[in-house]
Image (cartoon, rainbow, N blue to C red):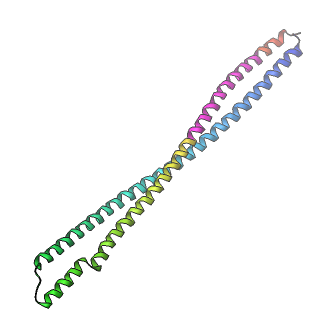
Amino acid sequence: MTKQQVRNNIRYNENLVASYTNTISSLNRKVNSLNNEINQLNSQISQLRTKVRNRESQIRELNQLKNKYQRLLNDFAKRQLQRKNKLSQNFSQKPNVKFMASYIKGMGALLSGNEYRNAYNGLNAAIIKISNTIKSIQREIDGLNRDIRLKENNISSKRRYINSYQEKIRRTDADLSYRRQRIRYWKNQMRYAV
């Protein structure tokens, strides 16, 4: 083999070494970029999970408040019914006194009239408003959980790319080692070339 042929073999292998080195550097940059993106997504997921926990805490507090209102409403209706029953028991007979008839009629209106309905409806409206707020917060939690799942899926996809790139890096690194070995071989062959 001539010295020129040996030099050509050395140059050919050096060009491959340069190409493989560039490929490995490029793949390492891609892996680093993907790792940075994964770190950003993990940070965003952490923030979203904090929001979910805060919203779930709000729902627990609102449910406690709603239960208090429900108990108050039930107690209010129960006491009102007891008062009405007591009024009808106490005055079950038709009184002859006009004043008493007027009093009974007034008390009956008070116990089942507009004031009672307004109070009862006010408590009921508060319960409905709390329930609607809970539903709204739950929808927000559902949206946050969807965002979390999307980001987790994105992370999984990026990890698959990283694994693919790392496998290419391993293969290219093996090729690089082989070509470096070939350069050493051809440099040793130079002394035997004519």
Query: Observer-nearest residue: 143 or 30?
Result: 143
The percent position of residue 111, horizontal first and vertical second, equals 22, 77
Residue 90 as seen in the image, left or right of residue 17 = left
Q: At 37% from the left edge and 65% from the top edge, which residue is drawn? A: 128
The percent position of residue 17, horizontal first and vertical second, equals 75, 25
Q: Is residue 162 magenta?
A: yes
The percent position of residue 139, horizontal first and vertical second, equals 47, 56
Query: Observer-nearest residue: 119 or 10?
Result: 119
Q: Which residues are magenta?
A: 155-184
Above or below: residue 5 compared with residue 26: above
The quarter of the rendered structure image containing the C terminus is top right
Residue 38 as seen in the image, left or right of residue 79 = right
Q: At 76% from the left edge and 17% from the top edge, which residue is drawn? A: 182
User: Magenta region's main secondary structure?
Assistant: helix
Query: Observer-nearest residue: 178 or 83?
Result: 83
Q: Is residue 68 magenta?
A: no
> As drawn, which residue projects farthest toward the bottom?
98
Residue 102 as seen in the image, left or right of residue 65 = left
Quarter of image, res 177: top right
Q: At 42% from the left edge and 59% from the top edge, which residue is drawn? A: 135
Q: At 77% from the left edge and 25% from the top edge, which residue is drawn? A: 16
Quarter of image, res 161: top right
The percent position of residue 172, horizontal first and vertical second, equals 69, 25
